[in-house]
Image (spheres, rainbow, N blue to C red):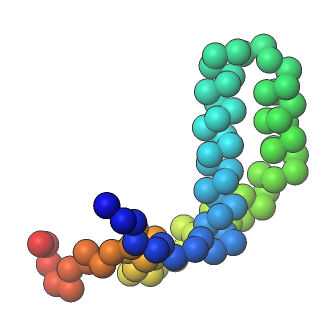
Amino acid sequence: MPQAAKAPLDADEERVTRAQRLLIQLGAELVSRPFDTHTHDRLRAFLADDASAVLTSLEKLRRRPETELQQRVAELAGHTLLSSGGPA
């Protein structure tokens, strides 16, 4: 089944998405190898260098109005399943 072209992420969406993926990966690594110094170094580097910008981007995303969020989800998913009035 061919996939529809999806809208690109804006800078805030990209920053938060990348951070989420990295933190999930680091969390899994910490569970499987809790004393791995490389993993700890990567987590420390993220917290020192990137966490502030990610939290700022996350706050911007959280402040978006509900209708804008719904529209953005539809754009990113490549469909428009939003109903215009009431439950489907």
Q: Residue furthest bottom?
A: 84
Residue 59 to residue 64: above or below: above
57 or 73, which is in the foreground? 73
Question: Where in the figure is residue 47, as x and y percent of width and height?
Answer: 81, 44
Could you tell me which quadrant the N terminus lies in? bottom left
Visible in this render: residue 59?
Answer: no
> Who's the residue at 61% across and 56% down the image?
17
Residue 49 to residue 56: above or below: above
Q: Residue furthest front?
A: 1
Q: Quadrant of residue 25?
A: top right
Question: Where in the figure is residue 82, as x and y percent of width and height?
Answer: 26, 77
Q: Is residue 27 left or right of residue 50?
A: left
> Who's the residue at 51% across and 76% down the image?
7
48 or 3, which is in the foreground? 3
> Who's the residue at 13% across and 72% down the image?
87
Total number of numbered discs in the rendering: 0
42 or 78, which is in the foreground? 78
